[in-house]
Image: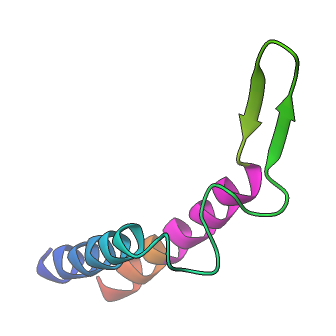
Amino acid sequence: MGRALIVIGLALVVLGVLLTLGEKLPIKLGRLPGDIVWQGKHGSFYFPIVTCLLLSAALTLVMWIVRRLR
């Protein structure tokens, strides 16, 4: 249980640093190539599909590491 909390804590620290320095990074989450943006006359539709895929892969990797440590 302790190792899992350490890994989750480290992941939160990394996420916090990414969010804090997000404007200075060359890759901006939520504005990646492949994200769907449609702007109409009376509104817009935005679906960050590539961002969702990257976050899913990152969370899968974190969960795999947590399971390996147990």
Our reading of the magenta stretch's main secondary structure is helix
Q: In the displayed image of the protein, which residue is found farthest to the top? A: 42
Q: Nearer the viewer, residue 63 or 21?
A: 21
Direction from residue 46 to residue 55 in the image, left or right: left
- Where is the C terminus found, in terms of image quarters? bottom left
Q: In the displayed image of the protein, which residue is found farthest to the left? A: 2
Horizontal and vertical percent for residue 37? 82, 40
State which quadrant residue 68 falls in: bottom left
Q: Measured along the vertical axis of the image, is residue 37 above or below residue 51? A: above
State which quadrant residue 56 falls in: bottom right
Which stretch is magenta? 49-61
**Residue 8 magenta:** no
Which residue is painted at 79% across and 51% down in the image? 35
Q: Measured along the vertical axis of the image, is residue 31 above or below residue 26? A: above
Horizontal and vertical percent for residue 67? 39, 77
Horizontal and vertical percent for residue 50? 75, 58
- Where is the N terminus found, in terms of image quarters? bottom left
**Residue 51 magenta:** yes
Q: Measured along the vertical axis of the image, is residue 40 above or below residue 32? A: above
Which residue is painted at 53% across and 77% down in the image? 61
Direction from residue 40 to residue 53 in the image, left or right: left
Direction from residue 49 to residue 3 in the image, left or right: left
Which residue is painted at 49% across and 70% down in the image? 23
Q: Nearer the viewer, residue 20 or 56?
A: 20
Q: How is the image coloured?
A: rainbow
Q: Nearer the viewer, residue 26 or 57?
A: 26
Direction from residue 29 to residue 50 in the image, left or right: right
Q: In the displayed image of the protein, which residue is found farthest to the bottom? A: 69
State which quadrant residue 62 falls in: bottom left
Horizontal and vertical percent for residue 8? 27, 72
Which residue is painted at 87% across and 16% down in the image? 41
